[in-house]
Amino acid sequence: MKLWVEPESKVPIYVQIEEQLRSMVAAGQLRPGDQLPTIRQLATDLRINYNTVARAYLDLDREGVITTQRGRGTFVAGVPDEEEMAHLREEQLLSILHTSLEEAQRLGYSPAEVAAAFERELSHWLRQNTHIS
């Protein structure tokens, strides 16, 4: 499992961790029962504060994405149902779009420029991926 954080981002670090873990679960990169690094280990690996990782894990635990078992560790929660999986996938896609739009705005692109570029790229993507629905 490879996580990273961008300290300069406007997105809080704990949210970056949450989004990446949700994304990995939604994509099947993390499966139910997979063990996650300890809070202390992840904080050390990412060179961030222990409490930042603890907050991300707590939020994900409350959402039912992960589960913490005292003395055993933190694990990806059980198999999400279809509705929950669809919700996780939608959140992941919206996060990708939101990040891209923020970057485009930061670089000074107009909404019309972004829309035109998106339409071109979507059309190109659809031509290359006709097997994807």
Image (cartoon, rainbow, N blue to C red):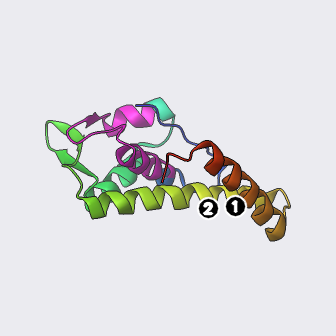
Label 1: few (<14), some (14–19) or many (≥20) C-alpha neighbours in 10 Å: some
Residue 94 position in % (x across, y down): 54, 61
Identify the secondary structure beneath mark 2: helix
In this rendering, position of residue 29 left or right of residue 104 = left
Amino acid tagged 2: His
Quick check: is 38 in the magenta stretch?
Answer: yes
> Taking the image as drawn, is residue 34 in sight?
yes
Marks 1 and 2 sit apart, C-alpha to C-alpha, by: 5 Å
Tell me the magenta residue range.
16-44
Judge from the rendering whether residue 111 lies leftward or rightward of residue 22; answer left or right. right
Q: Residues within 10 Å of mark 2 (few under 14, many from 20)?
A: few
**Mark 2, residue position:** 98
Q: Position of residue 72 (x, y in %)?
A: 15, 36
Q: How many marks?
A: 2
**Which label sits on residue 22?**
none
Residue closest to the eye, 82 or 76: 82
For the point 69% across and 54% down, the residue is 123
**Picture coordinates of residue 88 (x, y %)?**
38, 58
x 57%, y 44%: residue: 129
Determine whether label 1 and label 2 are within 8 Å by CB.
yes
Helix, strand or loop at label 1? It is helix
Q: Amino acid at mark 1?
A: Leu
Q: Is residue 60 left or right of residue 9?
A: left
Q: Is residue 95 magenta?
A: no
Give above or below for 95 relative to 124: below
Residue 59 placed where, x, y %? Answer: 34, 59
Res. 10 visible in picture: no
Quarter the N terminus occupies: top left
Q: Nearer the viewer, residue 21 or 85?
A: 85
Q: Residue at x 20, y 47 (%)?
A: 68
Quickly name the residue at label 1.
101
